[in-house]
């Protein structure tokens, strides 16, 4: 079973996504911010990460770069609201595998995770 880390400062979005992934057979790790995500990535070594772009303290781009320093082969998909295209492009250039637009479409989230874990 693949382990997926869901990183989002909005608890409702994080829980909704985590619940959906768990119902589809994934082990889920949650993080509420970038710093927590980096620490949990080191401890838990998830197979894939769904990472929100807009978060306080350490945003998704910074978090992506820190995770890739730890593990250059990390599989990360960015999550963003509409209107954040420039940040999504920057994230993809920095090493993100994919992106998912919020509010989440369940089938799109599943597709992004399957793409990352094979």
Image (spheres, rainbow, N blue to C red):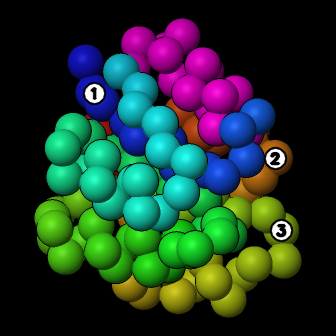
Label 2 sits on a secondary structure element that is loop
Q: Position of residue 30 (x, y in %)?
A: 47, 36
| Placement of 92 over or under 77, stated as above or below | below
Q: Find residue 103 and name its label.
A: 2
**CB atoms of marks 3 and 2 within 8 Å:** no
What residue do we see at 39% from left, 71% from top?
64
What segment is highlighted magenta in the picture?
13-26
Residue beneath disc 1: 2
Label 1 sits on a secondary structure element that is loop
Instruction: Name the image quarter holding residue 13.
Output: top right
13 with respect to 99 (left or right)? right
Q: Position of residue 94 (x, y in %)?
A: 38, 84
The disc, 3 or 1, on the residue closer to the chain's N-terminal end is 1
What residue do we see at 65% from left, 70% from top?
56
Residue beneath disc 3: 82
Q: Residues within 10 Å of mark 3 (few under 14, many from 20)?
A: few
Calculate the distance from the C-alpha at mark 3 to the C-alpha at mark 2.
9 Å
What residue do we see at 63% from left, 83% from top?
87
Q: Is residue 22 magenta?
A: yes
């Amino acid at each position: 079973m693949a382990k997926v880390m869901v990183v989002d400062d909005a608890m409702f979005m994080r829980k909704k996504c985590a619940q959906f992934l768990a119902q589809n057979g994934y082990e889920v790790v949650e993080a509420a911010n970038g710093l927590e995500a980096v620490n949990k990535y080191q401890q838990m070594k998830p197979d894939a990460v769904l990472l929100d772009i807009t978060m306080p303290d350490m945003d998704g781009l910074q978090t992506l770069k820190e995770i890739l320093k730890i593990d250059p082969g990390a599989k990360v998909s960015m999550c963003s609201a509409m209107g954040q295209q420039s940040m999504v492009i920057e994230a993809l250039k920095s090493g993100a595998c994919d992106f998912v637009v919020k509010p989440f479409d369940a089938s799109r989230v599943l597709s992004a995770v399957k793409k990352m874990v094979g």
